[in-house]
Image (cartoon, rainbow, N blue to C red):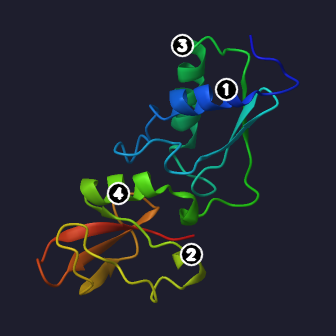
Amino acid sequence: MVSALSVTVSLRDRVLEILSAVHDPEIPCISVVDLGIVRAVRDGAVVITPTYTGCPATIAIEASIRAALDRAGLADMKIETTLSPPWTTDWISEKGREELRIYGIAPPPRGAAKQSLREQAAKCPRCGSSSTEELSRFGSTPCKALHRCLSCREPFDLFKCH
């Protein structure tokens, strides 16, 4: 049973390890931990922030987190959703950025959330070229934009910065 009063470091690490096996349903290459959705483990709760308000995957992510905690014997642990401060792509871990790139999604550079979408240089996840163009502000999911590499000519999604 999880105490509602405090979370030990070992419990926090255990919960993060459990949740590192829970993947985003729209981007299955990355865990909710590496995507930065899991904000904290504290006071008998896991605190999450969706990638954007109204994200259709939020309910599925919460259900997957709940199922993983239950399987691990942590059924008393609550899941709290907070929207403030809003999620930012700066919260994606270095491991998560590499997983996105390998999967074929251009990860945003750190600090890109402070730039406008037009100022962000999209680097092709396949060949590494910075010679790219935006085809559409909307990609395969609302949190991605569709780009094309002018070097290798391959289309790819760019994870939108915010």
Q: Which residue is drawn at 74% across and 48% down?
A: 82
Give the mark toward the camera: 1 or 2. Answer: 1
Q: Is mark 3 on a helix, strand or loop?
A: helix
Earlier residue among tags 1 and 4: 1
Measured as percent of width and height from the top left, residue 31 is found at 45, 41
Earlier residue among tags 3 and 1: 1
User: Which kind of residue does numbered mark 4 sit on?
Assistant: Glu
How far separated are the C-alphas under marks 1 and 4? Answer: 27 Å
- Viewed as shown, does residue 122 lie left or right of 116? left
Farthest-out residue, front? 10
Give the vertical position of 157 relative to 38 (above or below).
below
- Viewed as shown, does residue 127 lie left or right of 6? left
**Dot 4, crowdedness within 10 Å: few (<14), some or many (≥20)?**
some
Q: Do the residues labelled 3 and 2 touch (CB within 8 Å)?
A: no
* Residue that numbered label 3 is attached to: 71
Earlier residue among tags 3 and 2: 3
Give the vertical position of 67 relative to 128 (above or below).
above
- For the N terminus, the quadrant is top right
How far separated are the C-alphas under marks 3 and 4? Answer: 29 Å
Give the mark toward the camera: 3 or 4. Answer: 4
How far separated are the C-alphas under marks 3 and 2? Answer: 36 Å
Earlier residue among tags 3 and 4: 3
* Residue that numbered label 4 is attached to: 98
Q: What element carries label 1?
A: helix
* Residue that numbered label 2 is attached to: 113
Measured as percent of width and height from the top left, residue 2 is found at 76, 16
Measured as percent of width and height from the top left, residue 123 is found at 30, 77
- Viewed as shown, does residue 48 lie left or right of 159? right
Q: What element carries label 2?
A: helix
**Dot 1, crowdedness within 10 Å: few (<14), some or many (≥20)?**
few
* Residue that numbered label 1 is attached to: 10
How far separated are the C-alphas under marks 4 and 2? Answer: 18 Å
